[in-house]
Amino acid sequence: MKLLFHFLCFLPLSSLAFAADKPHLAFVVGTHHYSPQVSMPLLAKEMEKFGFRTTVVMPEGDPEKKETVPWTPGIEVLDDADVAVFFMRFLTIGDAQWAPIERYIESGKPVVAFRTSTHAFIYPKDHPRFSWNDDFGEKLQGTAYRVHMSGETECALVEKHSKHPILTGVAEGPFISPGTLYLTDLEAGCVPLVFGTGSTGKAGIREGGFGTMYLQKDEADILAWAWEKNAFGARAFATSFGHVGDFAVPQITRIIVNGIHWAAGKDVPAADAEVSTWVIADPRKKKRK
């Protein structure tokens, strides 16, 4: 121990501060839907290239609708995180695993959330955390889940906010997300960055556990947005991107990398900075023989 102390004493202060200067991103994988157990580790490695420290909290098996999720490392990693990156769906975790999430939320630290995280929890009506089924989306990210379309989504940047830092280096012109369009109901103060159009197949009334609504054959809505101050005083970047195919689209991966930087309060990469893309197999699509 004395030897280590003497060694540290002779290190330059810049070296001692090196790790502290790197914001810690904690990626919480809380579903296997859309394969974030594959995409989030790849994204974490990408963010390390840009000077972040990362930890990916990974479940053993599909964690949905389980009271205890075997996460490795434990969800307590959030206590040491500077930015939480959530990709979760339909969790019913108990008090012990909820507590670190609640502590993080109430800390007012930045939040990044992908796709199904608008419906991260599915507690029954008589559960004391039932309100979090909507609040985790609405109050933390800017919208609760409403409904989604079918088929791919045609995307474009919101021209009014084209100078927002998150859109730095994003090529102009339309692009395609292979994921379905999610409809939103954004809170006041959310800045829309990307919008898209998707199809329901046919117009009509849609009834389900998330409400009843009339949908047109084609709908348009926001796919990515920035929220300077959510209900807990935190910066939030949220998006319905997250389909495995999205990570092969240069515009989408650039928006995601920029969004994490912005949420963390860091300058986004220069417009000419290289951002990786990945082709990830969709396990839901069975190979034809």
Image (cartoon, helix red, strand yellow):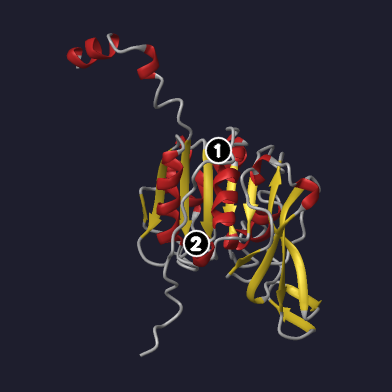
User: 71 and 84: which one is in front?
Assistant: 84
Q: Where's the C terminus, which quadrant?
A: bottom left
The foreground one among 252 and 274 is 274
Is 65 on the left-hand or right-hand side of 151?
left
Residue located 69% across and 58% down the image:
173
Q: In this rendering, does residue 181 appear at all?
A: no
C-alpha span from label 1 to label 2: 19 Å
Q: Secondary structure at mark 1?
A: loop
Please, what is the three-letter code of the amino acid marked with disc 1? Pro
Residue 53: quadrant of the picture: top left
The x and y percentages for residue 65 are 49, 68
Tally of numbered discs: 2
> Compared to 76, does 176 lie above or below?
below
Disc 1 crowd rating (10 Å Cα; few below 14, some 14-19, many 20+) is some
- Of all residues, the one furthest to the bottom in this rendering is 289
Q: Residue at x 66, y 46 (%)?
A: 167
Which label is found at residue 269? 1
Q: Which residue does the image show at 66% across and 48% down from the upper left?
A: 140
**Residue 69 x %, y %:** 41, 59
- What is the number of the mark on residue 42? none
Does the rendering let one see residue 262?
yes
Residue 238 sits above or below residue 92 on the image: above
From the top left corner, tell me how far across and down residue 270 is, in percent. Answer: 57, 37
Of residue 148 and residue 140, the one placed in the foreground of this image is: 148
Question: Mark 2: which amino acid?
Answer: Ala
Q: Position of residue 55 (x, y in %)?
A: 40, 44
Q: Report which quarter residue 209 is drawn in.
A: bottom right
Residue topped by disc 2: 248
